Image (cartoon, grey):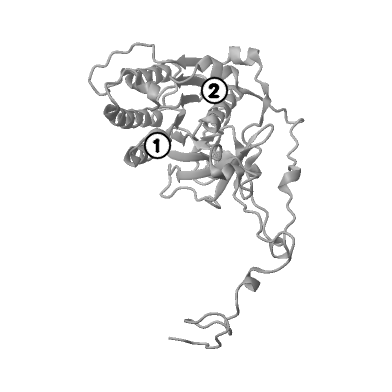
Amino acid sequence: MTSQQTTFQKKTKSKVPYIPGSRPSIQNAQLLISSGVPSFDYVIGGGVPVGTAVLVEEDKYGTYAKLLIKYFLAEGIVCGHSLIVASQDSDCETLVHELPAPIQQDDFVPTSDPDDKMTIAWRYQNMRVAQSSMSSTSFGHHYDFMKPMDAHRLKAADIFYWTGSIGCVQTKGWFRNPAYYDLLCTIQHKIDEGQFGVEANPEKRNILRIAVHSIGSPLWLEQAEGLSHQKSDLAIFLCFLRSLLRSAYTVCMLTMPSHLFQEISVIKRCEHLCDTSVRLESFAGSEKETSTVYKDYHGLFHINKLPAINTLTSHVPESFDLAFKLRRKKFVIEKLHLPPELKETTQREQDDFPSAGTVGCGGGPGITNLVDF
C-alpha cells in the first residue's frame, strides 16, 4: 500500500517566479506587462509582451505621444520596475517629475461622461455597445493627470536618466552619430548590472522599462554629419535594440516624429524593426479640429503593426477604426463612432433615393424602363 501511494503520488509542477506587474497571455502564454493605458493594452492584445519594442509615431505637436510615455513610466514605478529614461529633446528628470499619480481603487468609479450619450435614431437602437477599453481593468492601474506622483515614491524608484553624455567609444564604425551607440551601451550595462538577462539568476526577478522620447528628431542630428546618415543610424539602432530586448526581461517604448521624415521608406523600415507600431493623428491644427463629426475625440489612433510572439499570427482587434480622447483624468482609446446622419427626423437613408421602378440604368428620374442597355 505504501509503494502504491508512492507510485501514484501527485507531482507538483515547478512554479514560475512571479514578477510584479506582469501576467501571462491567455492566447500564447507570453509574459505581458501593462502600458499604463488599459485601452491601449486591450487594443494590442491584452498588454505589451516582454522582450519587445513599441514604436509610437508622434502626433504633429508631440503632445499625446508624450502622454503615453508618461503612462508607461508611471506604471513601471507603481509596479516597482526599473526604468531607463532617454531623450535629447526634453529634460528627463522634468519628464519623470510630471508623471501622474495613481488612482486608488476606492476612488476609481468607471462612469461615462454625459456627452457620451447620444440621441440616436431608431435604426441605431439595437447596435451593440462598443468595447471602449475597459475590458481588462484588473490589469494595470489608472492615473489622474490632475495630481503629480508622490515625490517619495519617485525618489525610491530605480530610475536612470540618459541624455547622451555617458561617452562610450565605438569599437567599430557602425553609427555616424555616437549617441545611438552610447544609448545601446547604457541599456546593455543596465541589463547586466540589474541581472535582467534571461540567463541571469537573480534572487528576485524584475522588469526593465526603457522609454526613448522623440528618437530621430532634429536634435539627434547634432553630432551627425548629415541627414542621410540618420536613416542608417535609426535602422541599425533598432536592429541592435531588438536583439538586446529579446535576451532580457525588458520592454522599450519609443516615440518618433515620423511627420518630419520626407521619405516614407525610412518610416516603414522603422515600423518593420519594431514589434508594435502605432501612429497618433491629432486633430490639433487641422480641419478636423472644428468638425462636428469628430467633436467627441482628440485624434485618430492608427495601428501599423501588432506583435506576433510565440504565435504564427498576431492579435486581430475588433476594429481598426479607432480614435482617442483625453478626458480630465485619463487617456482613452475607443472605436470611432460617427454621429448618425439623421438628427430631427426619422427619415431613412433609402428614402433619399428614387425607387428602382422609376429609374432606369441609363435614364434619369421619371423614366419607367426597368432595364436599359
Residue at which label 2 appears: 81
Cβ atoms under marks 2 and 1 closer than 8 Å: no
Q: Position of residue 37 (x, y in %)?
A: 59, 35
Task: Tell me what residue is drawn at x 40 percent, y 29 percent.
Answer: 245
**Residue beneath the point at 69% across and 32% down:** 328
- The kind of residue tagged 1 is Cys
Q: Which residue is nearer to you in this view: 282 or 166? A: 282
- Circle 2 Cα neighbour tier, 10 Å, few/some/many (<14 / 14–19 / ≥20): many
Secondary structure type for disc 2: loop
Image position, residue 41 (x, y; %): 56, 39
Q: Quadrant of the C terminus?
A: bottom left
Q: Relative to the observer, which residue lies in front, 129 or 95?
A: 95
Query: Does residue 313 appear left or right of residue 20 in this picture?
Result: left
Q: Is residue 84 above or below residue 1?
A: above
Instruction: Judge whether residue 1 can be spotted in this image.
Output: no
Q: Residue furthest left?
A: 172
Q: Give the camera-side residue of 230 and 29.
A: 230
Mark 2 or 1: in front is 1
> Residue type at mark 2?
His
Closer-to-camera residue (317/213): 213
Q: Earlier in the sequence, mark 2 or mark 1?
A: 2
| Quadrant where the N terminus is found in the figure | top right
Find numbered disc 1 in the image and state the secondary structure of the residue it sits on.
loop
Residue 116 position, x and y percent, is: 71, 47
Residue 106 falls in image quadrant? top right
**Residue 220 image position (x, y, % from top left):** 37, 22
Could you tell me how far apart the alpha carbons at marks 2 and 1 are, in whole angstroms? 22 Å
Q: Tell me the tag on residue 274.
A: 1
Work out whether residue 167 can be spotted.
yes
